[in-house]
Image (cartoon, grey):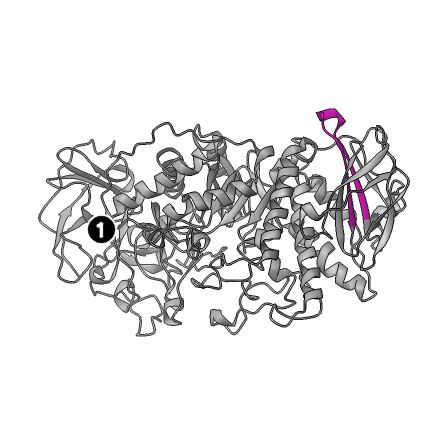
Amino acid sequence: MPEPTNETAIARTSPDAPPAFGATADAEGVEFSVYAGSATAVEVCLFDGAGTDETSTERRVALHEHAHGVWAGHVPGIGVGQLYGYRAHGPWDPTHGHRYNAAKLLLDPYARGVVGEIDWCPEVFGHTVDDSLSGDGGVQDGRDSAPYTARSVVIGNGFDWGDDRPPHTPWDRTLIYETHVRGLTEQLPEVPEHLRGTYAGVAHPATIAHLTRLGVTAVELLPVHAFTSEPQLVQRGLTNYWGYNTLGFFAPHPAYASAQSPQEAIHEFKGMVKLLHAAGIEVILDVVYNHTCEQGSGSGATLSWRGLSSQSYYRLDERGNDVDVTGCGNTLDMRHPETVRMVLDSLRYWAAEMRVDGFRFDLAPALARGLDDAFHPDHPFLMALRTDPVLSRVKLIAEPWDVGSHGWRTGQFPSPFADWNDRFRDTVRSFWLTDLAADSAGHGGHGVSDLGTRIAGSRDLFGSRSPLASINIVTTHDGFTAADLTAYDEKHNEANGEDNRDGSSDNRSWNFGVEGHESAGDDIEALRRRAIRNLLATMLVSAGVPMLLGGDEFGRTQHGNNNAYCQDNEISWYDWELTDRQRDLIDTTAFLSEFRTAHPVLRQRTFFPGDPIDGDALAALHWHGADGSILTADQWNDPGTRILQVVFDGSDVDDDRILLVLNGSARDTAVRVPEQRGVDAWQLAWDSACERPDELPSMTVPVGDELPVRAGSFAILLGA
């Protein structure tokens, strides 16, 4: 066990007023400050040269203890680019949550730059483990971890933002595109090879041109905080691709930068934001503040937080064991003020310094569980976000579920949050896929009442807020792509090395009779493409905020893998060698996006007035059956109803009357188009039975006449 050094940093602040956390460079040196609540001594460890190999020299400088568990001090003669870490001395008492081990080099939780990789060997564990990295977690390991772990880097300020102006796109004009920094451009031929899969690649003119063609107003990037792979993945020869395994909450993931130095990686990230802003595109980050890469206290490594103050940063029970509501081995304790402060400081850093425009919170209920472990909408963390002068002004999105008790909380987050709407996802998939499959086999489905509720903005979930609190999803990174929803009845995750046990089995998909893409004939592929168009159209015309999974606009496949978190390869990367039919789907997506933008009645900021059931004359939204008459309550709730006509009356917002015709039956049929005040006829504007928008036949149907509709199709008409 290393002994504390005799060299001591300079104390330049009052013990009762410690400096800001992290490493702050000035003209004379660097001020270091870190929280280690029960430590008896803390040293900052300075490394020369590259600092990440066994030949580098380590210089240890003792920090001064300040109030409330803060250790700080100024080290002269060093500056930007300095590599460092911490060693914390203190009690080893796992049953009380203390796992101090000065043999372990610790990353600064506030490090704005990280270099080096985690070498998953026994030395990086605070407790003794065998060569398979297994142990009971109770016996302290005295081996030095420095040669096998990453380093923090002192980062300087400064970047020429020029005339950068965040777009501040209103929610009612927002179209989110969920994507991955590497996967988006790793195979995009228009991007220079050295920029593919990087922050610079995301901001390349070819990438931006594609996004703007689709009408995208915000990219939602899978995690870009520095992360590492889990040891179990490394042992299987795989890596963490998605990034939900955070190593540093303030540092951009270095592997996504074309630049080599951490400082230049930050500039590259800022440059990406600046160029996207110039194109009118906001940047939303998927952030993982619910757990860290250190895994469980009795099984995971000691890389940072665990070695500084495990009992503060992690939610532990009375015996020092993790209370895990994330399924990842540990849960950050958002009941502790220092943990809450770290998360808020991280969010402010990315919003103010890196100028991102919003955040999507992974497993968000885990961040709002109180002393009783229950979810609380008035949790102090949520209150802080809602009142913070910086964070309350950016887009805040919740993934409103975790794996803890009563973890499903869709619609229960407070304003100004928006929630991923899983009810929308499940309902739309069921109507267009599993219910359609059931209808083709002569079985019943779920009717149209839930689908109508989702199209109208999910008032049952968001009635106390707004339709714009609903992020309407059909697919996300976590699950099948749209193309795979129409090609696979079962998941095919064998490449993940878990015997296909991982990933959800509740996919609400339909393969149209043939499993996979390879052996399906032209007729089946045509039906699948129509189904994709149905899914996209429903998302893009419904009240709420649509989120498009990147690649769905051209039918990207992951070959049936619905949990590709560890597939940093062609399974996950976008294949830009597009067929003509894939280009047609891009045209369709762009058309539907433009149609949404052109019609404010589809982008309501408040719920539609009136009761759409049983013929309320004041309703701005009407539901009709196949015969054109207003649906009765019995028809609305009848599980056998498979055809729905929806009239949006846009007259109050200087817009058209819009008719949606959704045929969820497995038969070609004809519907009688409804009467509507101010409408003499309905003109066909789009039909999912057509491969391309410009192939649409010219058709005007007088009110009360019949419109032919294909099986499993979606048509949009405008009042004339």
Range of residues picked out in magenta: 644-662
- Residue beneath disc 1: 85
x and y percent of residue 653 in the render? 71, 26
Quarter holding the N terminus is: bottom left
Q: In this view, does 380 lie above or below 310?
A: above
Q: Is residue 209 above or below residue 121?
A: above
Whether residue 359 is visible: yes
> In screen coordinates, is 188 left or right of 681?
left
As for residue 652 lying within the magenta part, the answer is yes
x and y percent of residue 529 in the render? 66, 57
Viewer-nearest residue: 366 or 702? 702
Quarter holding the C terminus is: top right
Q: Is mark 1 on a helix, strand or loop?
A: strand
Q: Is residue 143 above or below residue 718?
A: below
Residue drawn at (29%, 64%) of the image: 125
Q: Is the magenta stretch mostly helix, strand or loop?
A: strand
Q: Looking at the picture, which amino acid does disc 1 mark?
A: Gly
Residue 542: name its quadrant. top right
> In screen coordinates, is 589 left or right of 6?
right
